[in-house]
Image: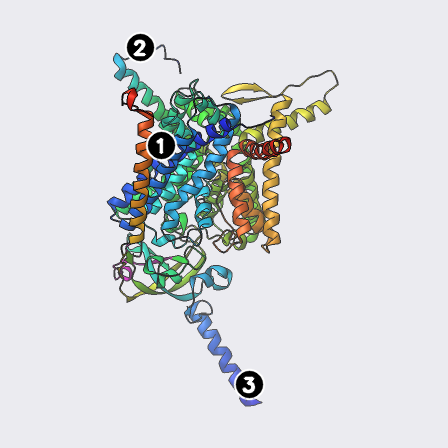
């Protein structure tokens, strides 16, 4: 939540833009997490399918 | 907590509940507008009746129960638990007037199911329901997911210290930000942002899959609300199976899994603490248990033989498993298929992940990942203690935004709530068996109700015995509020009676 | 004895030819309900069936095929809004996958405002369709519209309007009292 030490954009618009960009990245990360879990599950299913059937 | 509630206490609670009901009435304006825009005049009248009843109740409470006193802890607890029941009774008015319900009890069932983001339903002939009614059903889960109480906090209690006490008793112990009003607003901001993005993605995919623009738009909004809130309602009887679309399934899967995450986690990841996504105990717990569930389900599918390809394993197996584990309830199979097409092992894999549930301080139900993490670490610590020499002290900790050291009260608390869930699940299953349902089916639906999931193996229907309906309503309510406020409500009611009796004896 | 033997031989040959010719024992398309299909998926899997019911929701066209959901429950005959009785379930319906040409005849879809076209569908039932990710569906080769749909009238419920007016008056009365109590604007002499 702390501001990065990089150069700040001027005015409230600049920081608002950075805030929403941070949110967007958050959304991407969360979606990627779901993707990762799903892929892991797919891998497991492939393995079990091969073993059981 | 020795309660001798005074008239002032009752008045304060009444006033609080009045405000909650006003919130319900305000919420009803959304389906009202939907019905007006869809020229569904009968539905418009249904919602007008509902709104006016809510406003009337609020005014009565304001006139009779206005109090200058401040909220104490137990007031908050009672308003949370009592408020849900009252909101159920009032919210059922427009639903019942729609004609889709056999009895008022059925409408109450659906309302409790909506608010608690369960997703079981007794509504009949869903495929002929009005847009207004569908908007109400789906909005209920979205609002219920945020917590009726959070709504009240956001709009109605601005500035009251009582607000925090109601918020905590509602089952969310997270303090995202120091000011609880700001916490409520942060929760709304995250939800609304996902609403816009998620609905958009769904709308585009529905259009690609051949749905018309306007209906596609409504469906995308409703499907988002149902998935994000982990409610599981959909506008057609076949639920997600209606769309026969891999893309709709994938998008709803992503939405409901993200929706099942703890709000504190969202806030942390969104505001720069990216590592939280893999350090958080609930993410780790969820990942572990869902992958274990996947193994069990895959073995079951493999042995039973109905579903063959990897695609089927994913779209029928993992989808239902994830829907169950996040306690969503969206499904791509017929109810009876859990029993007849899944086989025993796969069916029980779904039951077990439903029981475990989603994250704390989220829209999900069940034991919660946080408690699973606590208990697992506790067990690991115990085993180490047994194995290590006497002198070694092995403290355990968990990471949940912050590092937290495990202590006995925390572990006891977690175990207590888990036991409460197991008790209600089992009682529900036993009741089902007594009424003649198959034990696996009875467990399936009971765990589904108690964990606020909403998948059904066929037990839940308008024809189920009334006693089961009442018990399921109780389970959905108790499960959602995590017992504390329920216990407070019952002891309050008991104290009221005892108090009166004491007065009579003296005179 | 000889005659029996000949008849048996002929029967066996016919069966083998038919079985061999169609790649499996072909049953004649059975008239069933969706409820029966769902309760007995294993028995009906890969068999040709015929269902009749109301087309509800949407026709979703995808390239040269499309989906339509057909309900054959009591509500497809008379929905709640047409005055039908509540029968104890939500709906019984199934997704039908058919060639675009077969679906083009369906004009009106069932919902709140419309009774959908009554259709008869003949096709192969799948317990877990391999083409569609395990969906339970019917791959139809024939969809006929038996009866076109029509708008459902929702007659004005006068009693609801009266209820609205009564409640509105109650709210206004209560609201007036509440307003006076929270906004005392009259000079002291007037109160009490």
Q: Position of residue B452 (x, y in %)?
A: 50, 40
Residue C5 image label: 3
Quarter where residue C85 is shown: bottom left
Question: How far from the left and from the top, in percent, is residue B95?
Answer: 38, 47
Q: Which mark is residue B261?
A: none
Badge 2 element: loop
Circles 1, 3 touching at the beta carbon (< 8 Å):
no
Q: Classify the position of the N terminus of chain B by image quarter.
A: top right
| Residue B262 seen by the camera | no
Q: Is B341 located above or below residue A46 in the figure?
A: below
Label 2 CA crowd tier, 10 Å (few <14, some 14–19, many 20+): few
Could one spot residue B373 in this view of the protein?
yes
Q: Observer-nearest residue: B441 or C20?
A: B441
Q: B235 above or below C29?
A: above
> Disc 1 on helix, strand or loop?
helix
Read off the residue under disc 2: A7
Task: Locate residue B2, reporting x and y percent.
Answer: 61, 26
- Subunit that carries the residue with mark 3: C
Q: Is residue B13 above or below residue B393?
A: below
- C99 drawn magenta: yes
């Amino acid at each position: 939540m702390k501001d990065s030490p990089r150069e700040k954009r001027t005015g409230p618009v600049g920081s608002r833009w950075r805030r929403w960009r941070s949110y967007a990245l958050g959304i991407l990360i969360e979606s990627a997490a779901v993707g990762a879990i799903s892929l892991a599950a797919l891998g497991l299913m492939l393995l079990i399918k091969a073993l059981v059937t | 907590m020795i309660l001798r509630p005074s008239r002032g206490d009752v008045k304060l609670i009444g006033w609080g509940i009045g405000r909650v009901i006003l919130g319900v009435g305000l919420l009803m304006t959304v389906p009202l507008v939907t019905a007006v825009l869809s020229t569904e005049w009968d539905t418009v009248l249904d919602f007008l009746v509902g709104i006016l009843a809510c406003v009337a109740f609020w005014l009565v409470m304001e006139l009779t129960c206005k109090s200058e006193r401040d909220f104490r802890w137990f007031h908050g607890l009672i308003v949370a638990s009592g408020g849900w029941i009252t909101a159920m009774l009032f919210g059922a008015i427009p639903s019942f007037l729609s004609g889709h319900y056999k009895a008022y009890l059925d409408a109450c069932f659906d309302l409790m199911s909506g608010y608690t983001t369960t997703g079981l339903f007794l509504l009949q002939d869903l495929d002929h329901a009005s847009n207004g009614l569908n908007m109400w059903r789906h909005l209920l889960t979205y609002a219920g997911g945020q917590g009726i109480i959070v709504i009240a906090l956001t709009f109605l209690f601005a500035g009251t210290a009582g607000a925090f006490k109601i918020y905590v008793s509602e089952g969310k112990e997270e303090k995202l930000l120091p000011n609880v009003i700001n916490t409520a607003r942060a929760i709304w901001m995250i939800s609304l942002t996902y609403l816009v993005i998620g609905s958009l993605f769904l709308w585009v995919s529905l259009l690609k899959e051949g749905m018309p623009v306007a209906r596609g738009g409504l469906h995308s909004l409703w499907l988002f609300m149902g998935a994000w809130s982990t409610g599981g309602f959909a506008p057609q009887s076949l639920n997600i199976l209606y769309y026969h679309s891999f893309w709709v399934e994938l998008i709803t899967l992503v939405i409901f899994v993200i929706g099942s995450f703890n709000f504190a986690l969202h806030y942390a990841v969104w505001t720069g603490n990216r590592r939280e996504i893999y350090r958080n105990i609930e993410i780790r717990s969820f990942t572990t248990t869902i992958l274990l569930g996947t193994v069990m389900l895959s073995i079951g599918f493999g042995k039973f033989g109905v579903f063959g390809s990897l695609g089927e394993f994913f779209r029928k197996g993992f989808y239902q498993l994830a829907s169950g584990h996040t306690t969503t309830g969206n499904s791509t199979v017929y109810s009876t298929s859990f029993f007849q097409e899944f086989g025993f092992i796969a069916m029980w894999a779904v039951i077990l992940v439903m029981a475990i549930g989603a994250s704390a301080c989220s829209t999900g139900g069940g034991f919660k990942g946080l408690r699973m993490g606590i208990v697992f670490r506790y067990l690991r610590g115990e085993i180490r203690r047994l194995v290590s020499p006497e002198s070694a002290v092995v403290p355990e900790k968990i990471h949940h935004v912050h590092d937290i050291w495990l202590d006995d009260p925390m572990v006891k608390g977690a175990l207590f709530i888990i036991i409460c869930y197991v008790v209600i699940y089992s009682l529900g299953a036993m009741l089902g068996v007594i009424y003649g349902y198959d034990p696996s089916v009875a467990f399936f639906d009971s765990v589904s109700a108690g964990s606020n999931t909403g998948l059904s193996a066929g037990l839940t229907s308008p024809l189920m015995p009334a006693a089961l309906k009442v018990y399921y309503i109780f389970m959905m309510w108790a499960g959602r509020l995590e017992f504390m406020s329920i216990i407070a409500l019952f002891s309050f009611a008991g104290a009221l009676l005892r108090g009166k009796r004491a007065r009579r004896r003296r005179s | 004895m000889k005659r029996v033997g000949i008849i048996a031989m002929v029967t066996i040959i016919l069966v083998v030819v038919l079985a061999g010719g169609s790649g499996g024992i072909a049953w004649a398309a059975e008239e069933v309900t969706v409820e029966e299909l769902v309760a007995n998926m294993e028995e009906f899997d890969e068999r040709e069936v015929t269902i009749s019911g109301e087309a509800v929701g949407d026709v979703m066209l995808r390239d040269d095929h499309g989906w339509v959901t057909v309900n054959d429950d009591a509500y497809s005959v008379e929905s709640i809004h047409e005055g039908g009785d509540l029968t104890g379930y939500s709906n019984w319906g199934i997704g039908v996958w058919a060639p675009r040409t077969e679906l083009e005849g369906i004009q009106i879809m069932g919902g709140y405002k419309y009774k959908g076209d009554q259709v008869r569908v003949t096709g192969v039932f799948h317990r877990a369709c391999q083409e569609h990710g395990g969906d339970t569906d019917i791959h139809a080769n024939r969809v006929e519209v038996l009866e076109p749909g029509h708008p459902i009238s929702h007659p004005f419920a006068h009693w609801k309007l009266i209820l609205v007016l009564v409640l509105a008056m109650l709210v206004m009365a209560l609201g007036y009292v509440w307003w006076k109590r929270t906004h005392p604007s009259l000079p002291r002499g007037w109160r009490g």
